[in-house]
Image (spheres, helix red, strand yellow):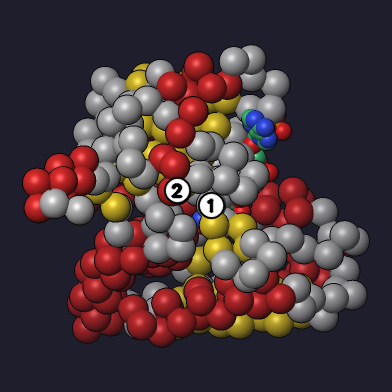
Amino acid sequence: MSNQQKVKKEENMAQIIDGKMISKQIKDELKEKVAELKAAGTEICLAVIQVGNDPASTVYVGNKKKACEYIGIKSLAYELPEETTEEELLQIIDKLNKDDSVNGILVQLPVPKQINDERIINAISPLKDVDGFSPASVGALSIGQKGFLSCTPAGIIELLKRSNIDIEGKECVVVGRSNIVGKPMAMLLLRENGTVTVCHSRTKNLKEVCKRADILVAAVGKPKMIDASYVKEGAVVIDVGIHRNENGKLCGDVDFESVEPLCSAITPVPGGVGPMTIAMLMNNCVEAGMNK
Ligand code: NDP
């Protein structure tokens, strides 16, 4: 490649949004805040409940504990057996709801099938719902009231802001309408004054709709589904998906290789949205402690 070609390639290269670096910044800011709170006599405490031994859940719970340790948040681990009943879990939540020394309660999902996850989420006090999944938190977001934000979408907004990407007035397309990613993502983009379209499995002409996007958020749960044919030149592409291929390598919902040359900025997998989810969970815990 000639020098001129190299310069041209570099000019055309997308900004790789570094979620690992931004999440570290956020965790360091929180660490300082937590130290200040501690000096003033307030200790932040998160209760993390895992039912059963799902290996992916064990990794997620382990990462959350590590983040707590790094920031200086106390974490209480409840490792309950697979056969735990819904009633037993509800009793633990009730006890934690009433415990003034606990600021946040998190039940790692999925829970075993004898437990109804909706009833569990509803049982967590909205004041301690650091995952932001409860109807009270979701309702507060949709009517513009204060409440805990779902961590992955909140992390995406933070990624955009800290990468100096404006949302106001932009065409934002979210592919996926789940309660934990797609829907709260749409609400948050709207709150930032984006013009938002939400797509799902019944959307007609999905490619054309996605091609309208200045900011395209892929939360489809289908490995590499969003390729260059879905992306407008110069768009910002946020990949929420996490998949492991047959060789154990991680990939997202976006076909990074085909999309990266076309877009202006993109999140990689791993190292994009993933690390932000835990950073925002930690942020919610600190807020819970400050609101006490
Ligand atoms: P869900 O499976 O709950 O939702 C997927 C959504 O995509 C649904 O709304 C579904 O539509 C839609 N969809 C599925 N297939 C198509 C299609 N062919 N065309 C258009 N829309 C489609 O997934 P989640 O929202 O929980 O997660 C999405 C991805 O993000 C997953 O890969 C997950 O692993 C990852 N994830 C990553 C996190 C992180 O921290 N980085 C956190 C949470 C999730 P419909 O509603 O019609 O069925």
Residue shown at the point (9%, 46%) measured from the top left: 4
Quick one: 279 or 224, which is closer to the camera?
A: 224
Between label 2 and label 1, give the one nearer the viewer: 2
Label 1 sits on a secondary structure element that is loop
Q: What amino acid type is highlighted by mark number 1?
A: Gly
Q: What amino acid type is highlighted by mark number 2?
A: Phe
The image shows residue 48, relative to residue 70, as above or below, that is above
Quick one: 276 or 75, which is closer to the camera?
A: 276
Circles 2 and 1, Cβ within 8 Å, touching? The answer is yes
Mark 2 Cα shell of 10 Å, populated few (<14), some (14-19), many (≥20): many
Q: In this view, does 113 lie to the left or right of 192?
A: right
The label shown at residue 252 is: 1
Residue shown at the point (63%, 63%) measured from the top left: 244
The image shows residue 155, relative to residue 70, as above or below, that is above
Q: Is residue 184 left or right of residue 110?
A: left
Residue 13 at x, y = what percent?
Answer: 24, 46
Whether disc 2's CB lies below 8 Å from ligand 1 is answered no
Of the 4 image quadrants, the one containing the C terminus is bottom left
Quadrant observed for ligand 1 in the rendered image: top right
| Residue wearing tag 2 | 256
Q: In which quarter of the image is residue 202?
A: top right
Residue 100 at x, y = what percent?
Answer: 50, 72
Residue 182 at x, y = what percent?
Answer: 55, 37
